[in-house]
Amino acid sequence: MAKNYYDDLGISRQASPEDIKKAYRKLARKYHPDVSKEANAEAMMQAINVAYDTLSDAEKKKQYDFELDHPQAAYDFNGGGGSDTHSGFGQGFDQGYQQGAHQGNAQGGFQGGDFSGFEDLFGRFGKGFGGGQYQQYSNDSRQQSFRGEDQHASIEVDLEIAFHGATQNITLQIPTYNAYGEPEVQRKTLQVKIPKGMKEGQQIRLSKQGQAGINGGEAGDLYIQIHYKQDDKLRVEGADIYYNIDISPWEAALGQEIEVNTPNGKVKVGIPKNTVYGKQLRLKDKGIPAKVPGHLYLILNIVYPKAETEQQVHAYEDLAKAFSHFNPRSH
């Protein structure tokens, strides 16, 4: 029997999908033109690429196995002759197509009684057996190129960048595949321009900075998701900022103006009289300056000082006398 795709990969027809993949990777390591010293490396790499493209696809493999098991069908179609069933079938198809094209037959390219069984063959074996295989065989002499996969990463930056923007050098460890199809971690340092107004969780697209293409294909894109540094006092939701600030009991009771150091600088805020713990003050459009600006929410936390001196103790005693009617547990 003529050499076939199974022979090209050095496997049997009973090989599992995992065995097919392992065989391909092993041969790719040996014959990849970038690293191989074999004289026929390019031709061998081309052959195993074509073989793997067919055998790694369940439908293509099923179709290919059928052709191996029914060589007479291709033999009859070609009018006999040819020990290599695949190349004979492809050549016969190609010659017929070229002949028809020269004759101006755009519908199919075949004329005359020599191809009377053409439609019957396609009806029995499915259109992929003829037209699809022609495309495959006519492309055997070329390696296909594939675009690299898009990749995703995330970085954490200071919230101030949302208001002013910044250009930063970042180093990422990105999972990818090497020239042999093996997984590895790639360390990549990039200069990233972060525009102001980026919301929490938004992405920046870096064109052609993703996984490299195969056989000269275009590289994929890299998407970097922006997250802002947050803590117990600060959190960001979209373009809105929630900021916990501490105030004194007299500021809460008397209603005073205070100065707050926000992520976008200092602002003066009026505390309403008799403010209670946990009250939120909304500063409109003072959040992230996006296309639709966010708001800054100040969450008020009343902090009571310790009574550490005699004078401070007396102050609390006087406060207790002044509010002797107040019982916080009566509610």
Image (cartoon, rainbow, N blue to C red):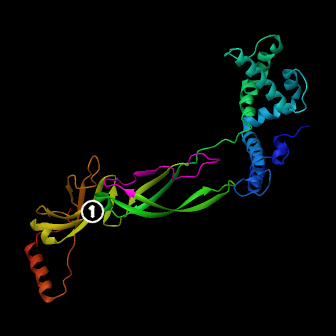
Front residue of 169/291: it is 169
Name the one closer to the observer, 106 or 52: 106
Percent coordinates x, y for residue 282 in the rendering: 20, 55
Does the rendering let one see residue 184? yes
State which quadrant residue 311 falls in. Answer: bottom left
Which residue sits at x=69%, y=55%?
34
User: Left of 274 or right of it: where is 63?
Assistant: right
Pointer 1: what residue?
A: 243
Percent x, y of residue 143: 69, 42
Q: Is residue 164 above or below residue 325?
A: above
Q: Position of residue 76 (x, y in %)?
A: 87, 21
Q: Is residue 187 magenta?
A: no
Stretch in magenta: 193-218
Local secondary structure at mark 1 = strand
- Regarding residue 277, the answer to whether it shows in the image is no
Q: Residue furthest top?
A: 113
Residue 234 sits in which quadrant? Answer: bottom left
Residue located farthest toward the bottom when viewing the structure as drawn? 310
Q: Main secondary structure of the magenta part?
A: loop
Amino acid at dot 1: Tyr
Whether 136 is drawn above or below 311: the answer is above
Residue visible at 76% across and 53% down in the picture: 31
Measuring from the top left, give residue 133's x and y in whole percent. 75, 30
**Residue visible at 83% across and 43% down in the picture:** 6
Number of numbered tags placed on the structure image: 1
Q: Residue 214 versus residue 141: which sits nearer the camera?
A: 141
The N terminus, quarter of image: top right
Residue 143 located left or right of residue 308: right
Screen quadrant of the C terminus: bottom left
Q: To which quarter of the image does residue 317 belong?
A: bottom left
**Left or right, residue 144 beside residue 264:** right
